[in-house]
Amino acid sequence: MFIDRNLRQPFGALRAMVVAVTASGLLIVGSLSAAAQGRPDTFADLVDKVANSVVNITTNTSVTVAGPGPNSGNPLEDFFEEFRDRNRQGEPDRPRRRGSALGSGFVISEDGYIVTNNHVIENADEIMIEFFSGEELEAELVGTDPNTDIALLKVESDGPLPFVPFGDSEAMRVGDWVMAMGNPLGQGFSVSAGIVSSLGRELQGAYDDYIQTDAAINRGNSGGPLFNLDGEVIGVNTAILSPTGGSIGIGFAMSSNVVTNVVDQLQKYGETRRGWLGVRIQDVDPELAEAFGLEEARGALVTDVPDGPAKEAGIEAQDVILTFDGVEIDDTRELVRTVGNAPVDKAVRVTVWRDGQTQTILVTLGRREDAERAVPASADQPAEPSEIELMGMTVSDLTEELRAQLGLDETATGLVVSDIDPDSGAYEKGLRAGDLIEEAGQVRVESVTQLEERLEEAREAGQKSFLLLIRRGGDPRFVALSLDEDASAE
């Protein structure tokens, strides 16, 4: 194995004498020993072990040379350039020049597979790899995953290449030492060290699982490795948070447990193949938990089930997914990541909470990349329009005029929130004028009379909250409203 896994050397044991003060002086009553925090005297040995596996990446891209337009230098230049491009259709090709970008990466196998960030090589015509020794090789793009900003490259070498293994990012703890390597600001191979500042950071993607570190990361470090003290890659340096564009000690590395799954798929297929369950979901807050009779606020509440694996297996709207393939689900983010990491076509057991008890359903997963959106089932439209004021809202039957104003299709049914009091609990829960109420108390409603009836039944049953299923812009969401507010018509 290329990496020595025995680099962690403590400074030594600290001896502390425990004493007690007596009338005659000091009395030694015992001694304790405590080991100092395990850390290296130097990172030099670690650098020597892994440096040959870290690479600089240079890309070349052909870009169109645009002549100065009437708004040259204006911040809206890109906006006007878009319209000029449309008007150039049919004109001769404009001159092109070469652009280049710098980034980092690391070798993960002796036969030349290299990991980096997708944004480092995106749209590149040529990708050149520079090794620590100064040798340069041209790389071929194997595949990319924009969702996690990971790319896999391949170089052909005359002999086996030194490489580094992945470590277990879940084994890292806040405060652990880490070391970053890469090509910051185009200055060549560079090393920085720090600690894990936080774990499980989410920036903007559904599959985000970033390690935050204060090890210096700058432009050009993108795609480089973040090492633990055993010389294992536990993250891919991807982004920084900075008002200046330079490192201020807040850097982010995509965790190795996410990266390894992506890399395995890119090696096998040249693309990702993520599992797809086929449900729309939302988090379960304490009021929703009370409304559904759950002991604790956890799981993923199913708000809609379009055509797909979940629907075929029998999962229904209002089910709360508690476990997926043996993994306990705390929230929607965990479900999305867990399903995405599952193999396509795998049959998994999904435990749901339905009607006050758990049920286990066997679902054969589809492929997320091939998923198609479906339209909810249609229902009849209410006959006579009317409205009512309750719980700080003005609720109206869905008329053809309202349907047209809200841009709803012919399949949409329910009640429309035509007005809402900004001081009401409903407003605080996120309801807004224009929302479509499809269900009340877990029953579909198509008239304000039905809504009143459901509300009265909830009060008589002694419920503390009232569950609504609303839809806004095609996206469903459950909302639990407190019944403490006055819900009578005015």
Image (spheres, helix red, strand yellow):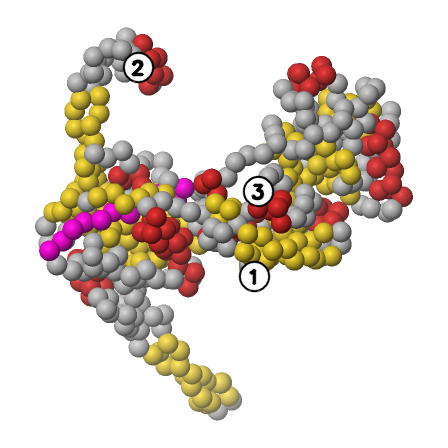
**Viewer-nearest residue: 342 or 221:** 342
The disc placed on residue 326 is 1
Distance from label 1 to label 2 (Cα)? 53 Å
Sequence-first disc among 1 and 3: 3
Residue shown at 49% from the left, 85% from the top? 21
- Amino acid on which disc 2 is placed: Asp
Residue at 65% x, 37% y: name it. Answer: 477
Q: Which is in the foreground here, disc 1 or disc 3?
A: 3
Question: Which of the 4 quarters of the picture holds residue 57?
Answer: top left
Disc sitting over residue 308 in the figure: 3
Q: Please tell me which residue lies in front, 38 or 350.
A: 350
- Separation of marks 1 and 3 at Cα, in angstroms: 21 Å
* Residue highlighted by disc 2: 85
Q: Where the N terminus falls, by quadrant?
A: bottom left
Q: Quadrant of the C terminus?
A: top right
> Which residue is at a point 13% across and 47% down the rendered structure image?
137
Above-or-below relation of 173 to 157: below
Q: Amino acid at mark 1?
A: Gly
Visible in this render: residue 253? no
Secondary structure at numbered mark 1: loop
Q: Which residues are magenta?
A: 147-158
The picture places residue 166, in percent across and down from the top left corner, at: 32, 60
Image position of 7 (left or right of 207): left
SS for dot 2: helix
Q: Which residue ends up furthest to the right in the rendered image?
A: 460
- Crowding around mark 3 (Cα neighbors within 10 Å: few <14, some 14 to 19, many 20+) is some
Compared to 199, does 367 lie above or below? above
Q: Quadrant of residue 429?
A: top right
Q: Secondary structure at mark 3?
A: loop
